[in-house]
Amino acid sequence: MDYRHDRAALDGLVQAGQVHRDAYLSEEIFELERERLFSRSWLYVGHESQVPGHGDYITVDLAGSSVVMVRDTDGSVRVLINRCAHKGARLVSEPQGNAGRVMRCPYHAWTYRLDGSLLAVPLKAGYEGTVFSQSRAAAGLSAPGGVQVYRGFVFARLSTDGPSFEDYFGQALKALDNMADRSPEGELQVASNCIRSVIRCNWKMYLENVNDTVHPISTHESASSTARKVGNEFADTVPTAMEQLLPFGAGYDFYSKMGATTLPHGHSILGSEFSIHTDYSDVPGYREMLEQAHGPARAREILSYSPQNVVLYPTLAVKGSPQILRVLRPVSAGLTRLETWVFQPKGAPAALLERGLTYARLVFSPMSVVAHDDVHLFESQQKVMASAGNPWVNLQRQFDPEECGQETHDFEDGNNELVMRNQYRAWLAMLAEPAAEESLA
């Protein structure tokens, strides 16, 4: 199927309440996603606390483009395409490190300032009398079409074509504000490293599951039932692990009242009223710290906002409590890398970081008592989806024809698959619009 040139075929992938399996299986579709969705969306690069000193850097793959995030000598955070302007060699190979005051290509020793501008080339005299000074190479390293640092979170849009940062995320940015404001100082510090997983499934399968409130009752039944048995042994103080695992056994009725919101561009808020994180026990002294920093009213507002998941489409899922980001790094139609990052609110008790680290290990580590259930299902789903028979994935729960054509909805029932349908409407809208000429060399 020529989805690139056949608009009718592309439109046919998403119908009212169902998605064709080619959306998950086709490498042609994945390449279109890179060109038309990922390149024009604002993708999460990292957090500025990962590069605290001048010359500190991390390298990240953004939808097939290698980028380096580096702290410049003036203190600003830069995001550059990790490719030498000379012959295209990878400039920085390590996942993190310190470049000093310059970055030098290991191939021919072209040297760049930390803002990407070209500093020096070997045999400079050899370029005299040529048009080198007018070439793209002389301009130095390429940069993404847009870079935005928001409350310490660093995003990039690879293409020059696409909406502004504020227009793209809109109300969804409240989730990042809430995370940062959980610090009495208004700033976060990333944990030293993240949990990385490689899952043999399409990235959209994982993202659907982030908003799927029906699966925990069946998929994670063994984990929740075991937690209940163990939890009965604790009469007074419930350990953090039990406090975090027990809510996975909440029934369908719990999720039906938690509230949800869909937003433009595929973003969503699941658990706008409450979530499985709402009733975590207080950390002694923490509320008082926030009240002193932000005032009693704002402190109450911050602590009362604990959605299950906020999706910043297409590749980021946010948990304000317990301060966790999940980042999807799609590799191919059938392969996805997942990063789980935990944050400590600066100036807050260390118990908050411990709570986040415990949750990440319990729920998102591939060896956890929860994630291995999901990963098994994702990978088996990817394998058998090409089997003979029904080629459609059904997302019709509580479908209402009147929802079509609208991007923003507030509703009570978290079991409504509208949050997933909203993702696919945004997905199709981006894929159906051919990409403009890219400015990246």
Image (spheres, helix red, strand yellow):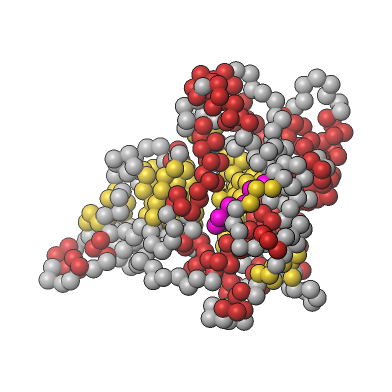
Whether 10 is drawn above or below 147: the answer is: below
Which quarter shows the N terminus?
bottom right
In-image side of 83 versus 398 (left or right): left
Which quarter shows the C terminus?
bottom left
- 218 vs 114, nearest the viewer: 218
Image spot of residue 350 (x, y percent): 58, 25
Residue at 74% in and 47% down:
413
In-image side of 291 versus 19 (left or right): left
Residue at 77% in and 21% down:
237
Q: Is residue 192 visible?
A: no
- 22 vs 358, nearest the viewer: 22
Image spot of residue 322 (x, y percent): 63, 35
Extreme front residue here? 402
Q: Which portion, as a residue range, is magenta?
A: 260-267
- 96 vs 212, nearest the viewer: 212
- 102 vs 277, nearest the viewer: 277
Residue 184 shown in magenta: no
Residue 261 shown in magenta: yes
Residue at 61% in and 41% down:
319
